[in-house]
Amino acid sequence: MIKKLYPVTGMHCAACAANVEKIVNRQEGVEEASVNLAAAVLTVVYDPMAVSPQQLKEAVMKIGFDLIIDEDNSVEEQKGAEQSYYKQLKWKTAVAWLFALSVAVLGMFLMHLPGVNVWMLLFSLPVIFYSGRSFYVNAWKQLLQRTSNMDTLVALSTSIAFLFSLFNTLYPEFWYNRGLKPHVYYEAATVIIAFVLVGKLMEEKAKGRTSTAIRKLMGLQPRTARVVKDGREEDVLISNLRVGNRVSVRPGEQIPVDGVITQGNTFIDESMISGEPIPVEKKTGDKVLAGTINQNGAFQLTASRVGRDTVLAQIIRMVQEAQGSKAPVQRIVDKVTAVFVPVVLSVSVLTFLVWMIVGGMDYFSYAMLSAVSVLVIACPCALGLATPTALMVGIGKGAEVHILIKDAVALEQMRKVDTVVLDKTGTVTEGHPVVTGWLHDAGWREEYKAILYAAELKSEHPLARAIVEVLKQEGETPAEIDSFESRTGRGIVVTCGGITYWAGSYRLLKDFGAGVSDVLKGMVEEYEKSGRSLVYFGEGDVLLSVIAVSDKIKETSVRAVEQLKESGKCIVLLTGDGHLTAQNVAGEIHADRFISDALPADKENVIKELQAEGRVVAMVGDGINDSQALARADVSVAMGKGTDIAMDVAMVTLMTSDLLLLPKAFRLSSHTVQLIRQNLFWAFVYNMVGIPVAAGILFPFYGILLNPMIASAAMACSSVSVVLNSLSLNWRKL
């Protein structure tokens, strides 16, 4: 199974999105299909051996929509399609209003002129057959597939009004013979189309703003690169670049691909990827990322990742997938919108029948107008846009401030979190520990340093890197070792010259049955009290040395924890370090609880225990040893400078090393969910109030009957108001 995102064109309402979902889900080989109306994107998981993108496209085209399946140019194609559609919509809206206003003036002020009905008919034709043509075509396609959407409602309401008026214009005697006056409703039919088109126009413009974050990210991708071939430089399109190509980058230019510098030195502004404002020095052998900006030195690089494989492309894809995903509340709305149009059609028919039963033929005009008003005012657009527009804006705003949200579920779930579990190394601390003390026991010899150097070179632990760095600075050379074994959560074991050596935590020391001598015990306790991490190095059951390593707490960690606690969250520090070290760090950041000596499985068990207490837990980590706990947590957050595994597992990635982004992410979640609730409230209230009023419930008491033209204006305003309310998140401070 593979997962793909394909832009969809031609959708206008929630029912459209539901129909696309339904038709794609019916295809053989499709496991799951989900459509985001606001982003106009289909996310589909399918078996490429059973169904092809072309087959999916053909299935979608049968119900009046289209899929863009050219992945390399999908964004450009979608943008082009949107611009073309918007341009056509403007023309259709202008024509609709020009003739609709003419019809309205004739119908309201000049209705007594001879032949006025014929003139109104003629002025209505351009509106019906040009401006409103798509409503009827799409409604017919939906009917053939036994589905319905907003086009069905508009097509039914306007065609009923138009055809009834056409009959009365051509055969007025039918009513005169029955003692009734033949009324025409051309102005209702034309003005409804004009208002609906205005609503669509405003909606399209507003929806375009919800994807500004994606457009900004895509703006970081250069269109061309300068490839070096046979000593000459040649400009080529990014799409034509291949791994291994040699690329030249000049000062001030954006780097086109991920690669490794092969010639030259420079400083690179990586703030758009990492969020760190200070340019980073890069020299031969260093990695560079696409989209970052070369500051002041020319250099050449060898491309290691191109096109859709670059880090920037992956970030863009992650944001797109997140914007296309559905929050739990959206699934409830989907169920409502799936039956919305059929229910409205039933209510419209019932409205007509009730009016006719109560008033007979004398009330025929009232019955028809009320039935048409029900069809017009009831629009699933507001309901369908309520959740996805808020999510799109929320996820986009997060991306702009370096908070990458991979799933809409996380955005909705974060506001429920009451307990935040923080990993220590790399999350609360700098993650760049340095050796601050070295104790030798009686049996120590200088040649042991070469063995320790060789052993720690093979370890990926941050403490190992600190020891390697200090031995490197001393000019030490690594010894030849026979074997290497990594013991997760404990340390490493090597053999050299047939002798076993080990380096790691206090647990590893106990595994080998070694002990701390009285000579070292006092200093070891002092180190632990001061919050330093200890690495024990020994041979067999003999302890040779104790190395103290300290990892500075980030300046922003204390403020971040303070803000989280102010919002009512319980803070738990979770670390594999010893009790005293954990206690010291927990005290400095004012954590509510701390857990020390935790192996990866222990970390997962801590999350389980907290969940068993009824807590909603967010886990924040950056290492491979955190991945189990991240996968278990209700909300998982990875630090962007951590490992790829942690970032793959996590629902949310903080792209900088600044923990202050964490309270911002929680506030973003709270604001977004608040907007979703506001949108849904007003969308439901609008329909619950609008439909009964349109049906004529106020007529017996106050003589109020809703004109279909007013109903269409209200319907247009409801959709636009929901989108504009979502956009207000852009101006809220996190």
Image (cartoon, helix red, strand yellow):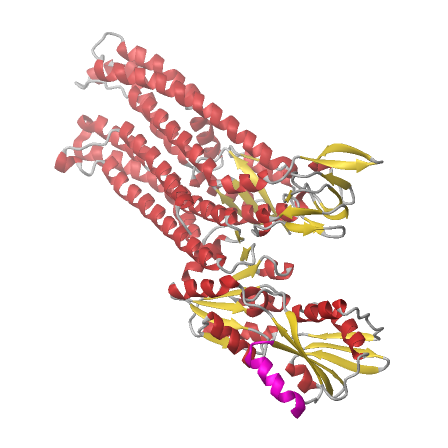
Of residues 364 and 339, the one drawn nearer to the viewer in this rendering:
339
Say how many tags the image has.
0
The relative height of residue 196 versus residue 55 in the rendered view (above or below) is above
Of residues 651 and 52, the one drawn nearer to the viewer in this rendering:
651
Kindly tell me whether residue 167 is visible in this rendering: no
Of residues 708 and 664, the one drawn nearer to the viewer in this rendering:
664
Q: Does the segment drawn in magenta span residue 230?
A: no
Instruction: Please tell me in which quadrant of the rendered image residue 197 appears.
Output: top left
Residue 562, x across and y down, in percent: 42, 65
Residue 169, x across and y down, in percent: 29, 14
Which residue is pictured at 13% across the width and 35% down the height? Answer: 702
Residue 422, x across and y down, in percent: 52, 68
Kindly tell me whether residue 620 is visible in this rendering: yes
Q: Is the magenta stretch mostly helix, strand or loop?
A: helix
Q: Does the segment drawn in magenta span residue 524?
A: yes
**Span highlighted in magenta in the image:** 517-532
**Furthest residue in direction left, as rendered:** 701
Which residue is pictured at 37% across the width and 48% down the height? Answer: 675
The relative height of residue 91 versus residue 531 in the rendered view (above or below) is above
Residue 601, x across and y down, in percent: 59, 74
Would residue 510 be found to the left or right of residue 390 on screen? Answer: right
**Furthest residue in direction bottom, as rendered:** 518
Of residues 377 and 216, the one drawn nearer to the viewer in this rendering:
216
